[in-house]
Image (cartoon, rainbow, N blue to C red):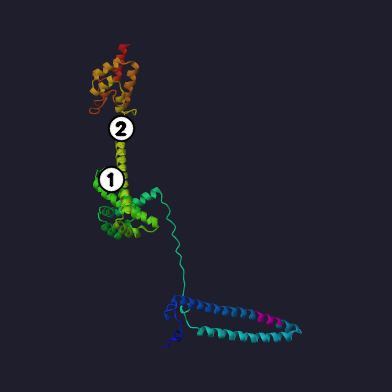
């Protein structure tokens, strides 16, 4: 078994932080002086080593050049050949001197006591710079809708469970156990749920779910401000909200009140849109053959004609038409026919299809036939 040589640890220069000075001496100043003096010695030793390396490089280059010149002189039998040999010999002697100086310098380094600056050195050093991830590409409206639909279908039950929680501790624990819910899709689902509840006039439940919506939105906003994953902000948000700082709680409650107002407004708008859609569907069902609404036509009729249709009095209708000018009678009765308020030849309709609005004449004649008789009489 090989033995480890610990002899290098026998000569260690006293550390700067050791307090071995006289009480009247400023220890901090002395340590700074010692450290600076040691750094100066190390710098001088390094300079000596660098100078020796440069001198030897120049000497070796000069020796190579002289040997090259000597070789050319021998080939040409030049008279300078003897002089060149003497110079080469002297350079080779100097080479031995450089080797001796290097050995002495290495010996001096080995004998130098270790200190805080030389006792350790990096065995391996590595620097890693994390490049920021590029932001994800913006999704189209269609892609967002598909993502929301898939998320809602998968986590619907868990989202509703979170929405019904009351205590901050329960919400924190639940979101910690289900971090996949800490995202915009959860907030979007809860917002739609709030609107549906307001339409159903479940105001108290809507108010509770709205509170959970703002909790989720505050977590997401905190993540955006810190530029980090929202899941890592759950604990930070609940820690702050539990402190009950007035400024923070005021901001939270203001946003909650504003959100409830937006929910009420959106629910009212949806109800109005549904009513308009229903009324339009009913209107489309009422439209007559020419696309006129019988109710609208009825409201535009002269009061005398209007009473005839409201009372469903055929005799009164005949009498009223005779009292009108031919142009007015034709105009109004044509609109009644186009809107379905009056059905020509109603007697030919199958039983059950003729309505009170399309009442037939005494002899099964239509209004058009009756109009012709009246106008012939007047003429």
In terms of secondary structure, what is the magenta stretch mainly? helix
Q: How many marks?
A: 2
Q: At numbered mark 2, what does the secondary structure look like: helix, strand or loop?
A: helix
Query: Is residue 132 depicted above or below 318 in this figure?
Result: below
CA–CA distance in space, label 2 to label 1 = 27 Å
Q: Position of residue 370 (x, y in %)?
A: 28, 17
Within 10 Å of disc 1 (Cα), the crowding (few <14, some 14-19, many 20+) is some
Q: Residue 283: which numbered mark, if any?
A: 2
* Mark 2 or 1, closer to the camera: 1
Q: In the image as oriented, which residue stretches furthest toward the right?
A: 79
Residue at 27% across, 44% down: 198
- Span highlighted in magenta in the image: 61-69
9 in relation to 200, above or below: below
Residue 196 marker: 1
Q: Secondary structure at mark 1?
A: helix
Whether residue 280 appears in this view of the structure is yes
Of residues 51 and 91, the one nearer the viewer is 51
Placement of the C terminus among the 4 image quadrants: top left
Q: Residue 324: which disc?
A: none
In the depicted structure, whether residue 58 falls above or below residue 261:
below
Query: Does the rendering let one see residue 179?
Result: no
Q: Earlier in the sequence, mark 2 or mark 1?
A: 1
């Amino acid at each position: 078994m090989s033995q480890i040589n610990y002899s290098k640890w026998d000569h260690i220069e006293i550390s700067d932080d050791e307090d071995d000075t006289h009480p009247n001496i400023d220890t901090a100043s002395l340590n700074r002086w010692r450290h600076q003096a040691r750094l100066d010695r190390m710098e001088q030793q390094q300079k000596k080593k660098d100078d020796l390396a440069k001198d030897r490089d120049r000497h070796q280059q000069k020796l190579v050049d002289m040997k090259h010149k000597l070789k050319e002189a021998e080939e040409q039998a030049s008279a300078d050949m003897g002089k060149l040999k003497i110079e080469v010999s002297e350079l080779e002697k100097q080479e031995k001197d450089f080797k001796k100086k290097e050995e002495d310098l290495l010996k001096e380094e080995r004998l130098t006591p270790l200190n805080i600056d030389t006792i350790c050195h990096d065995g391996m050093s590595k620097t890693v710079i994390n490049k920021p991830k590029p932001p994800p590409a913006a999704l189209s409206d269609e892609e967002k809708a598909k993502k929301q639909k898939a998320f809602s279908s998968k986590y619907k039950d868990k989202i509703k469970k979170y929405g019904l929680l009351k205590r901050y501790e329960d919400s924190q624990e639940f979101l910690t156990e289900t971090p996949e819910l800490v995202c915009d899709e959860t907030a979007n689902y809860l917002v739609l749920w709030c609107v549906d509840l307001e339409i159903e006039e479940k105001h108290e439940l809507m108010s509770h779910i709205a509170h959970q919506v703002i909790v989720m939105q505050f977590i997401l906003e905190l993540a955006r401000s810190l530029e980090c994953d929202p899941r890592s902000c759950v604990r930070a948000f609940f820690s702050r909200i539990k402190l009950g700082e007035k400024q923070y709680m005021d901001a939270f409650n203001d946003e909650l009140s504003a959100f409830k107002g937006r929910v009420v407004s959106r629910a009212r708008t949806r109800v109005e849109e549904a009513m308009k859609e229903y009324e339009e569907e009913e209107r489309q069902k009422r439209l007559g053959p020419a696309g006129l609404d019988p109710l609208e036509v009825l409201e535009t009729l002269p009061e005398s004609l209007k009473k005839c249709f409201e009372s469903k009095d055929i005799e009164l209708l005949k009498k009223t038409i005779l009292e009108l000018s031919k142009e007015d009678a034709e105009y109004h009765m044509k609109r009644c026919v186009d809107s379905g308020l009056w059905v020509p030849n109603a007697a030919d309709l199958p039983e059950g299809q003729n309505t009170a609005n399309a009442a037939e004449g005494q002899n099964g004649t239509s209004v058009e036939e009756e109009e012709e008789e009246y106008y012939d009489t007047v003429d």
